[in-house]
Image: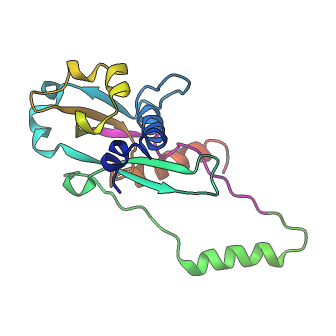
Amino acid sequence: MEMRHLLRNPKYSELWGKSYTKELGRLAQGVPGMKGTDTIVFIKYEDIPLDRRRHVMYGKTVISYRPEKEDPNRTRLTVGGNWIVYPGDVSTPMVEMMTVKMHLNSVISTKGARYCTIDIKDFYLNTPIERPEFMRMKITDLLPEFVALYKLNDIADQNGTVYMRIQKGMYGLPQTGILAQKLLEQRLNAHGY
């Protein structure tokens, strides 16, 4: 089922509605009890620069059930990145598999060695992007409580569409990977890594 089906189904609407609201709040300026990341800002259509209006992307919700997570009902709002016309480099350098194998082998082959990895929560989403992108969604695909909280009826166009300026990295943007890597390298290098 897609999110719109889950929200209309009385059996699932409350459970997935909370998950969806949490995701939207995390990307925007928050919801009661949770701080946002300012990744997206809701705007009027007129606030989109003229030269960017042809490339406004769609938003797509991706849902999954992850029983191993603290909150197993996961919702992610992604950008329809296949419509993006981005002028810069979007490739992220990768390390070869042989290098990874040698690295891991050196750790397990060294007596008393320790190894640590970390997951930097929301780092990807908090990476500023060099030029904003724009996305649209139908107001009917959003929860009424969220629409009321952000006063989206006041800025929706006559077709019931709301627009967002994306100002930080977001799932689906092809440039986010390289921008996040550059920012991480910059911050680690500043501390001698």
Magenta residues, start to end: 115-133
Residue 40 position in % (x across, y down): 35, 33
Q: Is residue 120 in the magenta section?
A: yes
Q: Nearer the viewer, residue 94 or 146?
A: 146
Which residue does the image show at 82% across and 63% down from the upper left? Answer: 114
Residue 55 position in % (x across, y down): 15, 45
Left or right relative to 112: residue 130: left
Left or right relative to 121: residue 24: left
Which residue does the image show at 59% across and 81% down from the upper left? Answer: 98
Q: Hey, which residue is sitting farthest bottom in the picture?
A: 98
Left or right relative to 56: residue 126: right
Q: Is residue 151 above or below residue 178?
A: above
Left or right relative to 169: residue 54: left
Residue 82 position in % (x across, y down): 23, 58
Q: Is residue 104 above or below residue 192?
A: below
Q: Nearer the viewer, residue 85 or 37?
A: 37
Which residue does the image show at 68% across and 73% down from the upper left? Answer: 103
State the predominant SS element of the stretch in magenta: loop
Q: Hey, which residue is sitting farthest right in the picture?
A: 112
Q: Is residue 127 in the magenta section?
A: yes
Q: Is residue 130 above or below residue 29?
A: below
Residue 167 position in % (x across, y down): 34, 35
Q: How many marks?
A: 0
Model colouring: rainbow
